[in-house]
Structure formats: structure tokens, C-alpha cells
């Protein structure tokens, strides 16, 4: 198991993710998760949450579908 955490380049990645997806309010947390994935080279996120589809840098797969 690997714990993902914000590294030195996290803020620029998060800022870019927020801007490109036009995120505000409660969606900021989803953008943070997407930015963590991008920062750690994770290309696919498994989730049933359709809101992650707005982040183009991470491919979303629904493990329940």
C-alpha cells in the first residue's frame, strides 16, 4: 500500500486542475484527489462517482459497471 500525499509540485497541479475544470465549492475535494493522482503518475481512478469525469488528466473507471 502507498499513501499519496501532497509533494512540492502539488499546488501548481491543483491550481491547474481547478482552473481547467472550473471547480468551486465542494468539488474542490474531488479536484484535490485528481491532482494527487496526476502528481503521482496515476492515470486511472476507479470510482463510482461520476463527478470525476470532469478532470481530463485522469481516466475514470467504474468498478461496479
Image (spheres, helix red, strand yellow):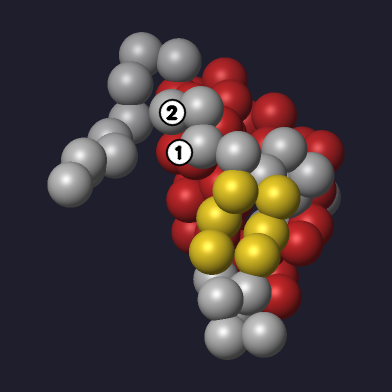
Q: Secondary structure at mark 1?
A: helix
Task: Specify the label residue 36 is tagged with.
Answer: 1
Name the residue located 62 percent from the left edge and 31 percent from the top edge: 15
Name the residue located 60 percent from the left edge and 48 percent from the top edge: 44
The residue under label 2 is: 40
Give coordinates of residue 55: x percent, y percent: 74, 49
- Decide: few, some or many residues near mark 1? Use Cα within 10 Å; few <14, some 14-19, many ≥20: many
> Do tag 1 and tag 2 residues touch (Cβ < 8 Å)?
yes
Name the residue located 79 percent from the left edge and 44 percent from the top edge: 56
Decide which of 55, 61 is in the foreground and name it: 61
- Left or right of 17 in this view: 4: left
> In terms of image quadrants, where is residue 65?
bottom right
Give coordinates of residue 8: x percent, y percent: 36, 14
Q: Secondary structure at mark 2?
A: loop
Question: Of discs 1 and 2, which sits in the foreground?
Answer: 2
Can residue 25 be seen from the camera position used here? no
Image: 7 above or below 4: above
Can residue 65 be seen from the camera position used here? yes
Give coordinates of residue 61: x percent, y percent: 65, 65
> In terms of image quadrants, where is residue 54?
bottom right
Amino acid at each position: 500500500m502507498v499513501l499519496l500525499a501532497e509533494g512540492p509540485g502539488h499546488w501548481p497541479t491543483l491550481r491547474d486542475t481547478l482552473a481547467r475544470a472550473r471547480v468551486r465549492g465542494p468539488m474542490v475535494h474531488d479536484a484535490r484527489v485528481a491532482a494527487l493522482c496526476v502528481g503521482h503518475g496515476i492515470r486511472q481512478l476507479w470510482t463510482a462517482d461520476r463527478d470525476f469525469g470532469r478532470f481530463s488528466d485522469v481516466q475514470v473507471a467504474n468498478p461496479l459497471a
